[in-house]
Image: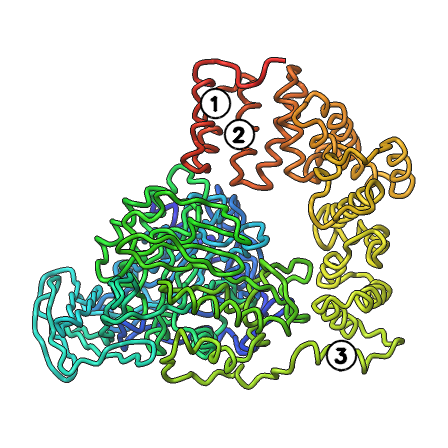
Amino acid sequence: MKTVIYLAIAILFSFFFQTKAQNKWKAQPINIQTRWFKEVSPNNALNEYPRPQMVREKWINLNGLWDYAITPKDSSVPLKPEGQILVPYPIESALSGVKKSLKPDQNLWYMKKITTPTGINKNQVLLHFGAVDYQATIYIDGIEVGMHEGGYTSFSFDITKFLTKKIHTLFVKVYDPTDKGVGPHGKQLLNPDNIYYTSSSGIWQTVWMEIVPANYIQDISITPDIDKSLVYVNVKSAANTDVELKVQETLTKGKTNTMIAIPIKNIKLWSPSKPHLYGLKAKLAEDAVKSYFGMRKVSIAKDEEGVDRIFLNNKPYFNLGVLDQGFWPDGLYTAPTDEALAFDIKAIKAMGFNTIRKHIKIEPARWYYYADKLGMLVWQDMVNPNQGLPEGSKAAFEAQVRETVQQLHNHPSITTWVLFNEKWGQYDQGRLTKWIKEIDPSRIVNGHSGELLYVDEQLRSPAPNAYINSDMTDVHSYPDPMMSIKQDGKAQVVGEFGGIGVFIGDHQWNPEIAWGYIQEKPAALKLKYAKMNELLNLQNKQGLGASIYTQPFDVESEQNGLMTYDREVIKIPFKELRNIHRQLNPDLGKIPQVAAENADLTDPEIIYHRLLAKYKNEDSDRNVIRKLLLMSDSFKDTINLRKFAAKLTNVLKQPYDKKDLQLVMKLTKVTNDPGFDFLFKNSDSINAVLGANAADGKIISLIDKEIVLTIDPNASIYVDPWEMIAKKPSVKVDWDKIKRFIETKYGNLGIEAFYKAQGLYLFYKTSGDHAALIPTYSKLMDFLYKEYQDKAGIRVGGMILNNIAWSIFEVVTDTVLLNKALRWSRFSIEEWPENYQRMDTYANLLYKLGRVREAIEWETKAMGLMEKKEQYRYRSTIEKMEKGIKTWPDK
């Protein structure tokens, strides 16, 4: 019955795809793009053979234009296509030609006509997927072939028995809830912000078919042993049979599914300075594949002074690295071209680094091939589980870890597995670190990168048992590097440091959001970076064995790269970077030729002053004004910043450009800035472009700053000032006068800002007397309900909502008000799903309303997000809930 249903679906789906006229593919516009953006077309979408360590001659690339549709998750089939999508670029990317976000309650469908390869009678056909995020179900002519879960690893199906005619219809159904699901999602969020980025749903690596004989090579495992001058090869197949291996023109015979030891004469070691690769050919009856390997060893050992260090090929080797996240403005998870994929490694090597920490992403096989070929050590992060650890997340994480380790085993560049990053979904660290070593004893394991976390030398995250079974102790320290703790038998490393934000106008993903741990002008970056490396040199003498700088390229809102996100502007010339790095990485080897090496390296500040000199006051060219505005902001030129901000708002006409509005939003910081009047007068039009409440929220935050300065002209408006003001006994506040003034000047938006400001002030002023806050909070919420009805609360910041909800929980017994508070609490969680304090508020409100089972579930979730040493507090609350004891104070 299932087959019949799917056949009916296939006929229906095929009918629409054959009869519906399709729109021609066109890349979607984006703020910035790489130089490879214009090279991409449906005829050349990543045409290179995708698996360099197992190459066959007969293969068919299925990249290119596919039909697509998006349906509700519970819908069985789309009734018609929405258009065409360029595979393998994620649907959210500009290069896909679609640039739509896939929601957790939707499925994404792909469809493509495929032709049965010739000679199928004697052979089999394998269908390969490099990666599909997150859950992929494959159908041929409506009949299910198989399903794979996990967005970062490859998978294959034997589709021979489904190929019964010349032309078939291949379907791929994708479900990707991103951060709302149980599976690993890396740094993708449905609502990207700060250090989290745009999601990459669907097919994002190459799809291809291979023709193989009935008895074929399924996989090859290669493990070098330089101490014995041997390489161990295990050729895997369905049945144990004879196999021939050829290395250095020497033929070795053996059996499949067993370890075959091959001697290597006159061994040439693989290293970043001399990345020698050996060719390997494997032949099983009529099947033959080409591969390669490198002879290298990584270990932890004591140097001549008895210091535990990372050794490469039995010698101490400082791992001088960068934190590379593998995002692209035009393709998101997918590099626009193969040349672009190689560029990143070439550029990092040209900067003088020898190590890449591949951060919370698994790259296509060709990326690791270039790391092997060019000579680059790789610390490979596992893609972290959902940080809330919902049910099923641990199993999904461990399945992805196993697939990752097995899939990447043969690459000599990979020397280190990184299990967890900071506290992102951390659990069972000792067990999992040991488990990875059992799966792959040929590499070292960093069990926890950044459990010790310092920002501005303040410890944010202690680590009493962080490094159990790990080969290193690892600290994250921003901005300056610090030494990790010393433990015998473990190397000391700084797994992240730096994060110097340098903002380059016209090269920003989103001008409204530009982020770095610290900010510097472009001219000051080199000096600051050189000083950090001087500190690393001193720490190396004290025992530091590795450093990872954040980061080589800007990524979306993060502007702390050594190059811009579009790979166009080099913030420190490569040659100067190599000179800075030479003491820690003296043997650079061959430096790759990188196109950006010849880019204009003129100091951006000099370029800015040249543009200023050419500018004429009557010039109303929006692009010229934008560029000068961005640059004046980068160089903190406040006089020209105000001048060009005023000019930009004067020349903007409807329909507004999203990029222009984002820039105005970013650069309007107080109510007397030139952009404020523009935002206030055009809020409805701006909301229509940027999203509901975007302008309103910005206006309210600016009015809040004005209220702050009205009360205390000396207050800082760039950090939350209300606690400071509330604790100043000399400050007297006439709230009635302020309310009249703000309401007269700004109307309803002013009233909303007023109540929020008064609520925050009273929250800090009353020092926990929640009963005193209820009148103000009630006025605020009543005002919002009256003004916005069902939308009430969405505009209110989550911290305020949580404060309101907790205050009501502690002192109110009225169920109507408690239910309102429950709703506000839920809104606060939606803004920050991993915040255990907001979950705790929600759980306690549920409990007070008599919804005990739900309360215990939410409190348990909250407890799981806390540090283990702090969990006793929430465990006590759960015990009270189970026993029916009050969790709120007696009043």
* Amino acid identity at mark 1: Thr
Is residue 71 placed above or below 249 in the rendered structure? above
Q: Nearer the viewer, residue 79 or 602?
A: 602
Q: Which mark is residue 609?
A: 3
Asked whether, in this view, residue 498 is left or right of residue 57, the answer is right
Q: Position of residue 263 (x, y in %)?
A: 11, 76
Q: Quadrant of residue 138?
A: bottom left
Q: Quadrant of residue 771?
A: top right
Separation of marks 3 and 2 at Cα, in angstroms: 54 Å
Q: Position of residue 483 (x, y in %)?
A: 42, 57
Asked whether, in this view, residue 815 is left or right of residue 388, the answer is right
Q: Quadrant of residue 504?
A: bottom right
* Amino acid identity at mark 3: His
Q: Nearer the viewer, residue 383 or 176?
A: 383
Q: Where does label 1 land, which residue?
A: 877
Asked whether, in this view, residue 526 is left or right of residue 714, the answer is left
* Amino acid identity at mark 2: Asp
Q: Nearer the viewer, residue 665 or 333?
A: 665
Task: State the residue at coordinates (45%, 53%).
Answer: 186
Q: Residues within 10 Å of mark 2 (few under 14, many from 20)?
A: many
Task: State the residue at coordinates (48%, 56%).
Answer: 477
Q: Nearer the viewer, residue 48 or 792?
A: 792
Are the two marked residues, 1 and 2, in contact with CB atoms closer than 8 angstroms? yes
Q: Residue furthest front?
A: 305
Task: State the residue at coordinates (27%, 80%).
Answer: 276
Q: Position of residue 116 (x, y in %)?
A: 32, 68
Q: Residues within 10 Å of mark 3 (few under 14, many from 20)?
A: some
Task: State the residue at coordinates (29%, 50%).
Answer: 433
Q: Position of residue 110 (x, y in %)?
A: 46, 58
Separation of marks 3 and 1 at Cα, in angstroms: 62 Å
